[in-house]
Image (tube, grey):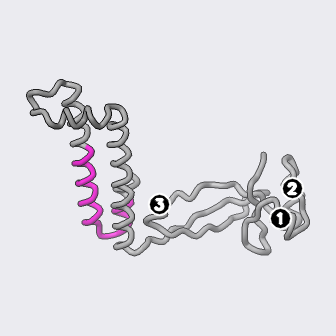
Amino acid sequence: MAYNYFYFQPLDSALTATQLKQKTGITYFEGMPNENLNRSKVYPVNEIADPYDAGLYTTVLSYTINGTEADQTWTPTAKPLADAKINGSEAQKEKYEAEAVAIQDDYGNLTLIAAAAKTSAQRSSSETSIIDSLKAIATNLSNDLASIEAATDVDESNAIVNP
């Protein structure tokens, strides 16, 4: 298995292969037995992506030695609620904007403008479907923004932003 990072226990930090060579003189190669690295207090890192929303939480990365490798652990701290509300609202706006743009890309702005200019009775079923989809996006965004604003803690906002 190829590794991108190596936990160096004496520094309590992860290093790239280049940094590992610079700091320890150890040259890592794919297939090198982990035990060879472990003798120098070096442990290949099992990477996991930060599972917490960076707009809502600040995280601290730590490492736990697990046999001949090191596991990553992310510890979250909620950002101030006011900041989390702003960030969560912006995230939802971006999410729903992307959904609306996808619909616009499928049908084109002129088609949407023409459909919106018609009364409900004049619209074809496909035009009605398009307009209903855009209305649903607007309604969902409005509801999400209201829920985020009403949230009393960051975890409530997170449940809306990252269901």
With 24 as the anchor, is 135 left or right in this view?
left
Q: Which residue is mark 2?
A: 28
Q: At 87% across and 51% down in the image, what residue appears?
A: 29
Q: Which of the two labelled residues, at mark 2 and mark 1, occupies the earlier sequence position?
A: 1
| 163 up-or-down from 89: above or below | above
Instruction: Assess disc 2: are there few (<14), some (14-19) or many (≥20) residues with their C-alpha within 10 Å of its C-alpha.
Output: many
| 116 up-or-down from 88: above or below | above
Foreground pick, 35 / 127: 127
Which numbered circle lies on residue 53?
3
Amino acid type of disc 1? Leu
State the separation of the CA atoms marked 3 and 2: 33 Å
Q: Residue furthest front?
A: 110
Which numbered circle lies on residue 20?
1
Q: Quadrant of residue 155?
A: bottom left
Instruction: Assess disc 1: are there few (<14), some (14-19) or many (≥20) residues with their C-alpha within 10 Å of its C-alpha.
Output: some
Q: Find residue 63 and report its horizontal and vertical position in percent.
A: 68, 65
For the record, the magenta segment spans 137-158
Foreground pick, 136 / 73: 136
Q: Find residue 100 and report its horizontal and vertical position in percent.
A: 32, 43
With 60 as the anchor, is 138 left or right in this view?
left
